Amino acid sequence: MNWLEVTKNELWKHPKTDTLIRREGNEYYLYDSSDFNVRIPIKDFLDSPAIQIIKQLNILESQSVLYLEVISKNFLTENQLATIDGDIADNTKIYSNGQAIGFVTIGRGVGEILKLQLSGVIENPSWSWIPGQDLFLSANTLSSTPTIVNSKFIQKVARAVTPTKILITIEKPVLLN
């Protein structure tokens, strides 16, 4: 099981430690994997990194998903970033033409209706992000490092919650020129 897999009454194991988190109803508990009889309420550790994990889990579970339909100006693939006018998002283009607005839900060709996901969680089994990484539009793809060379703007678009899942957090671009 992945470290932030959202499943009711399951355990989340940190990949580098033996720390386990379990949700039981609305309460979260820390366990030591060597002794499952030892259970400590996480609310006793308000400064703990586990609190940040729980906040992410709660965000994922309560996140409503917003969509927008536009006419595609180009061939776009699933999980590719797109602009408000249905083109491929690209931070090397002029700001108003390249700004990402959402992720493509199903690949479409020119002139077809394109459904963009604007919020929520998306998954791609071929991704291998590090949980907690911020993700940016880089040329016309995703990167964990903002690209400045040849870029017109920097735009944060998501945050990795597992190696294969991201939480969409599209922000306003920051102009470079």
Image: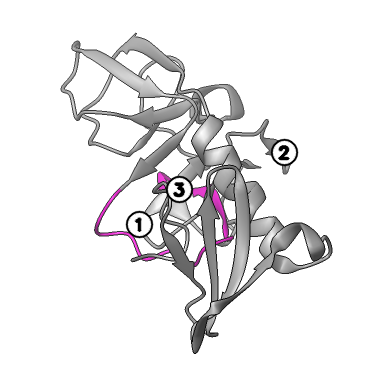
The single residue placed furthest to the right in the displayed view is: 47
> Which disc, if any, is residue 42?
none
Task: Tell me the SS state at disc 2.
Answer: strand
SS label for mark 1:
loop
Q: Residues within 10 Å of mark 3 (few under 14, many from 20)?
A: many
114 relative to 95, above or below? above
Q: Residues within 10 Å of mark 1 (few under 14, many from 20)?
A: some
Q: Nearer the viewer, residue 14 or 20?
A: 20
Residue at image mark 1: 164
The N terminus appears in which quarter of the rendering? bottom left
**What's the amino acid at mark 2?**
Val
Q: Residue 13, can we see it?
A: yes
| Location of the C terminus (image quadrant) | top right
Main SS of residues in magenta: loop
| Residue position for label 3 | 166
Magenta part of the chain: 124-141
Q: Can residue 148 be seen from the camera position used here?
A: no
Q: Which one is closest to the eye, mark 3 or mark 2?
A: 3
Instruction: Name the residue located 72 percent from the left edge and 38 percent from the top edge.
Output: 174
> In whole angstroms, how far apart are the C-alphas of marks 3 and 1?
7 Å
Secondary structure at badge 3 equals strand
Q: Is residue 4 above or below residue 100?
A: below
Residue with the mark numbered 2: 174
